[in-house]
Amino acid sequence: MSITAVAYPNIALIKYWGKRDETFNLPATGSLSMTLDVAPTRTTVTLAPGADDDVATWRGEAMSGDDLTRVRSFLDLVRELAGSRVRAVVETANEIPTGAGLASSASGFAALAAAASGAYGLDLTERDLSRLARRGSGSAARSVFGALVQWHAGRDDASSYAEPLPASALELALVVAVLSPGRKPVGSREAMRRTAATSPFFPAWVASVPTELEAMRRAIADADFGAVGELAEANALRMHATMLGAVPPVRYWNADTVAALDLVAQLRTDGLSAYATMDAGPNVKVLCRPQDAGAVAERFTAAFEDVNLLIAGPGPGVRIEGTR
Ligand code: PMV
């Protein structure tokens, strides 16, 4: 049995930063994101009866170390649910630089959850698929669904899942400016752990997110682009402020990050409605209206010599592409 699934990355407008429980990946707060229509991850899981262990490849190359361990632990979860001991071959490929704060783990574990649960014969609801994807990487819970999605913090494994927001007239584009494609020095798992354990700002972050989530939901329902952008930019900066307060500090920013944030501020001064957001990496993503995305991208191309740009709109949830 072989199943191929495709999932897209998502970018949070209200971020997930910090866990309440590491075993189940229960978040300290809820979060809210947009699933993108670029840079999908495509993953095939093939059952391998008789094989001694799971094998995984990324773009045809054997995975090893922590990456392989994470895939195997995830398959163990799926096997436990399915009551199976059969090993699997996992083939995966994605089109964005992994580990640069571009949410490749979100599309990766959403695709793996869908392909593996299918290959092992689990017939999961979308909600249960979201709960399963969460175990691989928290943000993956949101990539199960398309467009605008909220992940409810929940109280336990059963109640912590994502679901799509009600349809809204809001039109959003996201310009992803990749200035530093390298792998980040500290992974989000360790960075969250350190922030939650040592940053004096973390309790303030946890206390403020629910209010921000409510305000974001309202701004989306009202299709108020300016309010969405202001809330998203402020939330991303607050997330980074909590990390800067950790011991030792977690700083993903570099000189290009600051220059990109300056450019976004300049775009607003010039009359373009654009707002910045950032994840666990140095790259800056710009929220704008779809009709302004080309102009935003041009300004980045003019300002930075080595910038790779992706223009994204709202994308679909995870889907099964093929069964053999
Ligand atoms: O899902 P993880 O463990 O890779 O964490 C993602 C964290 C952020 O991208 C920084 C924020 C978010 O909500 O996606």
Image (cartoon, rainbow, N blue to C red):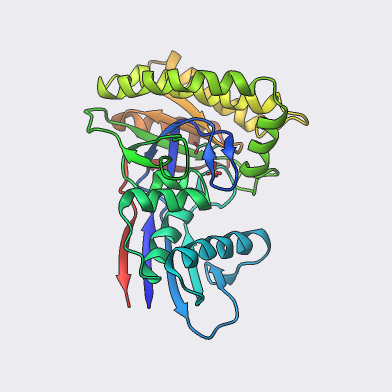
Q: Position of residue 231 (x, y in %)?
A: 43, 20
Q: Is residue 209 visible?
A: yes
Give the quarter of the image for residue 168. top left
Q: How many marks?
A: 0
Q: Given the current orientation, which residue lies at the most extreme right position?
A: 248
Task: Determine the residue positioned at 38% across, 60% down.
Answer: 114
Q: Is residue 228 left or right of residue 84?
A: left
Task: Determine the residue positioned at 50% across, 77% down.
Answer: 86
Q: Is residue 258 left or right of residue 154?
A: right
Q: Given the current orientation, which residue lies at the most extreme bottom position?
A: 50
Task: Determine the residue positioned at 38% across, 53% down.
Answer: 129
Q: Position of residue 36 (x, y in %)?
A: 37, 44
Give the quarter of the image for residue 14. top left
Q: Is residue 41 visible?
A: no
Q: Position of residue 154 (x, y in %)?
A: 44, 35
Q: Is residue 272 above or below residue 142?
A: above
Q: Is residue 290 left or right of residue 117?
A: left
